[in-house]
Image (tube, rainbow, N blue to C red):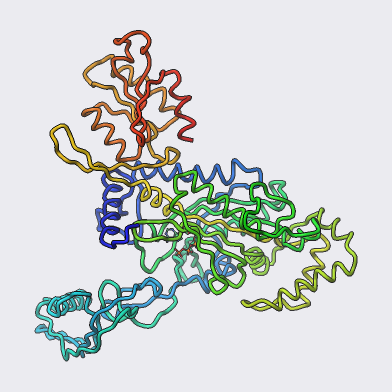
Amino acid sequence: MSSDPKASIAQMEKIVSLCKRRGFIFQSSEIYGGCGGVWDYGPLGAELKRNLRTAWWNTMTREREDVLGLDASILMNPAIWKASGHVDTFADLMRECSLTNKRVRADHVDPQSGTVLKYSGAQSPTGWRWDRTITALTKSGEHIESFRKRIRALIAQNAGESAGKPEEIELLGEEKIDAVNGSVDFHPETGGMLGEARPFNLMLKTYLGPTATEDDVTYLRPETAQAIFAQFKNVFDSSRVKVPFGIGQIGKAFRNEVTPKNFTFRSREFEQMELEFFIKPDEAVEIISGEVAAWHEGADLSEPQPNWGWELWHRYWVDQRTKFYQGIGLGDVLEYYWQTPADLAHYARACVDILCEFPFGTEELEGIAARGDFDLSAHQTASTKSQEIFDEELKTAAAKLSDEQKESLIQKRLAAEAAKVKGEPMPEAAVRAWFERLFKGSYVPHVIEPSAGLDRMALAVIAKAFSETEKVDEKGKKEVITVLRLHPRVAPIKVGVFPLLKNKPELVAKAREVYALLKKHLNCFYDETASIGRRYARQDEVGTPFGVTIDFETCGEKGPELLDTVTLRHRDSGEQERVKISELLGKLLPLVS
Ligand code: ATP
């Protein structure tokens, strides 16, 4: 990110413009003026997203023996959202502009400085009157006359036709109140004074059923995770797995964000890729392995071990996810924010936000939380269906413990409960009842949750890949060339196939042959129009990592040794090499997968 805010905005505008111009991302419902916080992915965006989705799915499920996939529905029984706490607490604090009623998330108001002006009301020659105090902040460097004009326009917009023309609105009883510095009490766009912060539930309500009454209310899921918890038992019972194991899911999620912003970064409809990785409670690990391994700087996280407790599993997943991001070209733009005890939810043991550098700032890409058994236990209580699993190994190990050893484990847990800084400590009777079940081999699994956003990931890779270089053409004219340096694994088009000249049938026929050969395995683009340099530039702009040119050498015109060879051009290095057509696929496939 540039330290100059204007440069960052300009950079973002260029990215948005490229995304539209080349078919990555369009505003939803654009021909009707758009639909706030909702975006559509064009042909190249759809391919890019698909590549990211596949990379996540393969890394997180297919290539692992301990993670299974799920594809649950968006609509669910609303009782799920009650049990998960979303109905009561999934809210952002929002504040409303007293001038325009525009809302803003309370924690998204940047400090502003300027002069505060107050009016006792406003009126217009149409007879319209506003008997309400107007308090607003001038923007930095704003002349008083421009400020008044702006306030009149905002009032006219809000009041509708009855207020008449903005320039005829009279602002009454102007008073200069004060100069403020770093205030967060004014709307960032309008400058109007903000009201008190109020909770605003982010779930999108809808009706499921023919009556469309309050009895039929349900919600579009605000996250994919809850379906995994709700189906935990079905997956466990049907898949012959043992804890530790995970369930991964990719799918749409919906949040009525108060202020969707920064292009697709904060949308109202988006896609999540979430893993719930179920582990044994630390006490079970201790009973089975005799100890719980402690994490330390430099701990070996390459292979999960039976004596890992929640902390090592959490560190392991942070490490795995970091490797994933390195594998799609984001390795060098990541930062980590470890939530402090004050940030953490009462049930969470740790949570790290993986942040990524965007042109508008360093922001969250993924959260990885150690959530204890909060979610499954909440569903167990609300549904009255047991979410416990039975662990034979645990039962056998517990049977070998002496009464003193058992009591010592109980005392350790009671001390931990008493030392809790957040949330109510578990009463002793409940702790003892929990251990009684544990010693018989039964427990509700704990969970580590790496939760990523696909749209943010797509934006992150585009922003990271965006680069501009200046080129001087043969006539000495300067031109700014955009190159999208996308990692070959995520690039929407992997290879551009070009006959050197389109009016040479033998070149075109050979190029079509090469295209037909490659396209069965890779997303390719065939292009025969314009100069070869222009065609390379077009593909560079959309991030195509490789270009294949079919020239006279290919057709054997420069000797038999070059017959059936093509020029393979590498986007980033500009390197060009001669490759046999028969070896092309074998060379390209490992580079793009
Ligand atoms: P934020 O603090 O940015 O609102 P969050 O902490 O509420 O995000 P989570 O509930 O942890 O986000 O969701 C997990 C992931 O889903 C986020 O890291 C992000 O990548 C993605 N995500 C969440 N909300 C949105 C959104 N409105 N638009 C796009 N992606 C989102």
Examine the rendered structure and indicate whether residue 207 appears above or below residue 160. above
Q: Quadrant of residue 114?
A: bottom left
Q: Quadrant of residue 361?
A: bottom left
At x 36%, y 8%, the residue is 560
Number of numbered callouts drawn: 0
Q: Is residue 104 left or right of residue 31?
A: right
| Quarter of the image where the N terminus is located | bottom left
Examine the rendered structure and indicate whether residue 153 appears above or below residue 61. below
- Please provide percent x and percent y for residue 516: 39, 23
At x 44%, y 77%, the residue is 199
At x 70%, y 63%, the residue is 385
Question: Nearest the camera: 296 or 261?
Answer: 296
At x 59%, y 47%, the residue is 69
Question: Nearest the camera: 471 or 438?
Answer: 471
- Please provide percent x and percent y for residue 160: 19, 75
Q: Is residue 173 left or right of residue 401?
A: left
Question: Nearest the camera: 153 or 490?
Answer: 490
Q: Is residue 368 left or right of residue 549?
A: right
- Please provide percent x and percent y for residue 208: 49, 62
Residue lying at the far front of the rendered structure: 298
- Please provide percent x and percent y for residue 17: 26, 50
Question: Nearest the camera: 97 or 158?
Answer: 97
Q: Quadrant of residue 82?
A: bottom right
Examine the rendered structure and indicate whether residue 119 appears above or below residue 483. below
Residue lying at the far top of the rendered structure: 560
